[in-house]
Image (tube, rainbow, N blue to C red):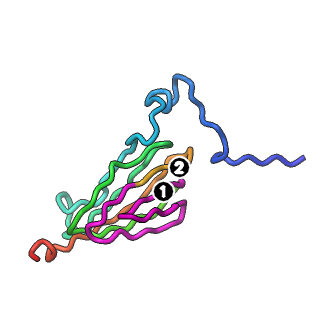
Amino acid sequence: MKYVKNIEDMEPDTCERSLRFATGDRKDKTLRDTYFLIDPKKCPSKNLKMGMTTVYADGKTTGHDHPNHEEVYYVIQGKGIMVVGDDKYDIKTGDALYVPFGEFHTTYNTGILPLQLLWVTAEDRERDKK
């Protein structure tokens, strides 16, 4: 007999030791960790900033824009929705996404596994002078 189960199709544990129990039943809550790996303020890079953000199940990022930075995201693990301006994109492991200068963007984790995103921003200092 064959038996196949996919973790993304399962109901998560909600006992008192679970993250969901600790954060409550709030949907669309900001629940993420970000690590700045390369930062011009702390390393030789002049224009590039790179980091990794983990968005936990049922969580989201706060969303932001940056007028003088463009940005790319690479999905290391998980699945979700990324909103860029007026557009929504379903994202999953292996996807790469470009965010133009000044576009507001936010990310929602729609799966049960942590959504891990590697991101890089590039600053255009000349845009500040315009």
Magenta stretch holds residue 82:
yes
Task: Count numbered badges in the picture.
Answer: 2
Disc 1 residue type? Ile
Residue 125: x and y in percent read 15, 73
Mark 1 residue crowding within 10 angstroms, few (<14) / some (14–19) / many (20+): some
Residue 14 in the image: state x and y as whole percent: 56, 29
**Which residue corresponds to the image point at 24% horizontal and 63% vertical from the top-left?**
66
Magenta residues span: 78-106
Residue 49 vs residue 59, the one in the foreground: 59
Using residue 95 as the reference point, say whether residue 124 is left or right of it. left
Magenta-drawn stretch, dominant element (helix, strand or loop): strand
- Locate the C terminus and report the quarter of the image it occupies: bottom left
Residue in the picture at 53% in, 49% down? 110
Residue 41's spot in the image, x, y percent?
17, 59
Q: Seen from this angle, which residue lies furthest top?
A: 16
Q: Secondary structure at mark 1?
A: strand
64 or 42, nearer to the observer? 64
As drawn, 22 above or below 101? above
Q: Residue lying at the far front in this picture: please name it.
A: 86
Q: CA distance from mark 2 to mark 1?
A: 7 Å
Identify the mark at residue 110; answer none if there is no mark: 2
Image point (37%, 49%), residue name: 61
Residue 112, compared with residue 12, is above or below; it is below
Q: With respect to residue 103, does 17 lie above or below?
A: above
Count residues near mark 2 (Cα–Cα under 10 Å), then give few for <14, some for 14-19, many for 20+.
many
Instruction: Tell me which label, 2 or 1, sits earlier in the chain.
Output: 1
Q: Find numbered disc 2 in the image and state the secondary structure of the residue it sits on.
A: loop
Instruction: State if disc 1 and disc 2 touch (CB < 8 Å).
Output: yes
Q: In this rendering, would 64 be left or right of 75?
A: left
Q: Is residue 21 above or below residue 55?
A: above
The numbered disc on residue 81 is 1
Horizontally, residue 19 falls left or right of residue 123, namely right
